Amino acid sequence: MTVTRLFSLPLLALAPLMLAACDDAATADGAASGEALPAIAAPAGTKWADTVTVTPEGGYMIGNPDAPIKLVEYASHTCGHCADFAKTGKPTLKDKYVASGVVSFEQREAFLNPFDVVIAGLAQCGAKEQFQPLSDQVWGNLESVFAGLQGNPQAVQAASALPLNQRFVAIGEATGLIEFFAARGLSADQARSCLADTAKIEALVKTVEANNDKDKIAGTPTFFLNGKKIEGTTWEVVEPALQRAGAR
């Protein structure tokens, strides 16, 4: 999917699109049963929860790159279930499981609508260590983010008709996204520079499409544990799966 094709999707039907594309939550299917794996110490002076690697798939992984248990989440920044997971699961995931060195957690993009492209471009604009914290800030403030996305429809529609090297910046300004990220450490000038880099945005969209096609991503969030899809979207499902694999 090209950027032009993606931005031909409706810009204003965000809430219905988000609800339709997010997976239904499943319930937990069992208690922990796997033998516990011993913790793996981080290199001296470092913490696994602060260790960030950009993977060949373009995901942002925190934790031990050689962790025996690898959790991958495909997520959309405008998905309510992804926001729920960020609030209910990620603190324990990072502070307990990733910190042990036994689990790594990789977040990959899934685009449900054109706004996801703009938000991802901003979240990936700064240092790699800031990507997941900025994503969590979006999910933690999703109601106010939605208000900005839907609050100025005429300006958004006008922005969507601009040339690509102006379009993303204009949408970022019309929706308040540039201001939102500026309040969280990404300068407005840096944000505009990243959103004006159409080659980078095009490459991002192509990478996301390739990943989504390969792993058959039909909704968000979608989780994979050591390459196998988890049938569920909530922390109540993911945590037992981690424990069955040996995480404690």
Image (spheres, grey):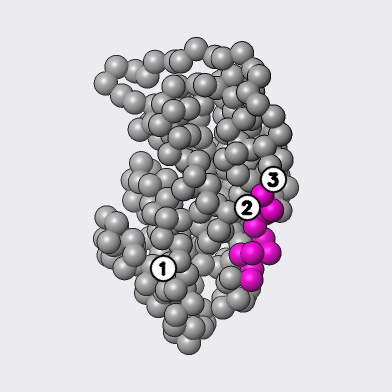
On residue 70, which mark appears?
Answer: none
In which quadrant of the rendered view does residue 95 lie? top left
In the displayed structure, 1 sits above or below 247; it is below
Residue 159 is situated, as x and y percent measured from the top left of the image, at 46, 80
Callout 3 crowding tier (Cα within 10 Å): few <14, some 14–19, many ≥20: some
Residue 173 is situated, as x and y percent measured from the top left of the image, at 37, 74
Distance in Å between CA atoms under marks 3 and 1:
27 Å
At 67% from the left and 32% from the top, the residue drawn is: 227
Provide the residue span drawn in magenta. Answer: 16-25
Q: Nearer the viewer, residue 130 or 148?
A: 148
In the displayed structure, 166 sits above or below 36; it is below
Residue 142 is situated, as x and y percent measured from the top left of the image, at 46, 62
- Give left or right: position of 243 versus 99: right
Question: Which residue in the protein does label 2 denote?
Answer: 220
Question: What kind of residue is marked 1?
Answer: Ser
Question: Which residue in the protein does label 3 denote?
Answer: 26
- Res. 35 visible in picture: yes
At 48% from the left and 87% from the top, the residue drawn is: 154
- Give left or right: position of 183 versus 105: left
In the displayed structure, 72 sits above or below 65; it is below
Question: Which residue in the protein does label 1 denote?
Answer: 144
Q: Is residue 24 magenta?
A: yes
Of marks 2 and 3, the one in the foreground: 3
Question: What kind of residue is marked 2?
Answer: Thr
Q: Nearer the viewer, residue 178 or 78?
A: 78
Q: Nearer the viewer, residue 136 or 227?
A: 136
Q: Nearer the viewer, residue 232 or 130?
A: 232
Instruction: Tell which circle, 2 or 1, labels the residue nearer the N-terminal end.
Output: 1
- Res. 2 visible in picture: no
The reply to whether the C-beta atoms of the residues labelled 3 and 1 are less than 8 Å apart is no
Instruction: Tell which circle, 2 or 3, labels the residue nearer the N-terminal end.
Output: 3
